[in-house]
Amino acid sequence: MAILLGLSVSGIVPVDARAADCASLARIELANTTVTAAAAVPAGTFTPPQGPPIRNLPAFCRVTGVIIAASDSNIQFEVWMPSPGWNGKFQGVGNGGFAGTIGWGEMAAAVAQGYAAAGTDTGHQGGAVDASWALGHPQKVIDFGYRAIHETAAKAKALVAAFYGESPKHSYFSACSNGGRQALMEAQRYPADYDGIIAGAPANYWTHLLTGALWDQEALLLDSASYIPANKLPAVEAATLAACDALDGVKDGVIDDPTQCHFDPSVLLCKGPETDTCLTEPQVTALRKIYSGPRNSKGAPVFPGYSPGGEIGGGGWTLWITGASREKSLGYGFGTQFFINMLYENAAWDYRTFNVDRDMKAADDKLGRTMNATDADLKRFQARGGKLIVYHGWSDAAIPPLNAIDYYKSVVAKMGAKESDRFLRLYMVPGMQHCGGGPGPNSFGALSVSSGDAQHDMARALERWVEEGTAPDQIVATKYKTGANPASGVARTRPLCPYPQAAHWKGTGSTDDAANFVCAK
């Protein structure tokens, strides 16, 4: 078996000449698994099966395989292992939407930093908003729900051990959206898979989230007069900012804490002829429903609504809720695909027949255990030293941010505040849209491992917590002048505070400098 030299001062593990060569991994035997290829990839540019070329990669061993966890399984996975230059750690990556492809970009980012990395398509091939693969394939739904991520972690770590001659010293998982759901599913179901987990904007209450998606679509589409076109959304956001932007003492185009914002959509009601700067009565009613969230026949809320702020922009409501035109939003796509293919398995099912009481119960009964990662009992994860960081953007138009707070509160209620504080942190990100973007500072090293320090990099903060026992406090987020490009220069920094704390301006100094803010309740 392979022999490995000890960690050097820099933390890099050089592979001994006797370590298993990459090609030999094609002959490894793993339960219910076939390794389909194993080959060394030279340093430089690598072009994955889908997507653009990935540049500036180190040399790595690429292993591809298929896991047959059940008779109808076809879980494709890849493991990338830097050679030389392994840092002794393993990084699992997740999937957005309905998955269907492997996260090669996220794997590349991890390998570039010295991590062995693995990803999976979760058992099917397809587009992120396509669930047609699920119709008539309940075992594939289980693979997507939780089994594929766990099986991939187990097989990947076995391959890492075979290649390097020892198991990873620490294992991490970081993903957002459906990937955030996967992250929480790992902590809840398979607490031994990872030592540290980052769950971004988790879609963990899947059945209720997609109930909410159809609630929004019915509010907008059942009556043609209710639809809110994209050209009216700037007026909606302007009204929310006028009502709530300055509540935190800083007028900066961001609502720092939407829970303090009591916005009344009726202020937008047209007082004369309809224009782009006002809403009709049916549109006001639809807007109110979207902010309030889905309710059952007794008027009780069953999932949070969306927070005011973030209605416009690339990741705003036009993309996720209202669509560029009727029935063209991602919310419409995800909601209808789920109910047609996963739940009812009936291509003729019509969203216009949707009923919250009936259809949400059907979803909970059939798929709640498979898809929902809502278990608040994380004792097994905590007992083995696991650490969990959850984050969510306050301007998220895909998954209501209050959902993350609800899950955090459920864990605290179950395990107690003191015990929860030993292993759990929640960071709410003002002005960030779904997994990134938006008007607020939103670069903080969450989606991929970067080379930043623990004060500015959530992944590094998690590692320091796991490996050194230093719990994270505030993490400084950055907004660059152009997108996520550091070369464009820094436009603003702002501290992200562990919930329930929030950033408060000290009253002096630039409001674009994190140093002039303090975290407090």
Image (spheres, grey):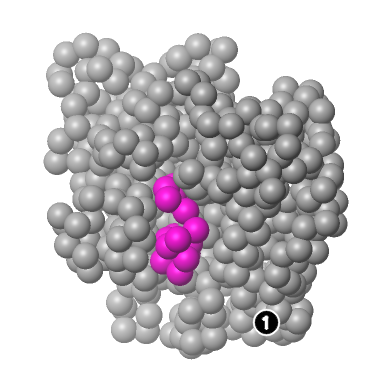
Depicted 92 relative to depicted 348: above or below? above
Tell me: 192 left or right of 327.
Answer: left
Viewer-nearest residue: 94 or 468:
468
Q: Is residue 320 magenta?
A: no
| Residue identified by numbered label 1 | 138
- Res. 247 in view: yes
Percent from the top left, x then y, of residue 343?
Answer: 61, 81
Magenta span contains residue 193: yes
- Residue 490: x and y, percent? 45, 14
What residue is drawn where x is 82% and y is 48%?
24
The quarter of the displayed image where residue 121 is located:
bottom right
In the depicted view, which residue is nearer to us: 317 or 38?
A: 38
Q: Measuring 55% from the left and 57% from the top, which residue is drawn there?
A: 178
In the image, residue 501 above or below residue 210: above
Q: Is residue 511 left or right of residue 485?
A: left
Please report the bounds of the magenta region as a residue range: 184-199
Residue 509 point in image, percent of width and height: 21, 11
Q: Nearer the viewer, residue 111 or 276?
A: 111
286 vs 78, left or right, is: left
Under mark 1, the amino acid is Pro
Q: Quadrant of the C terminus?
A: top left
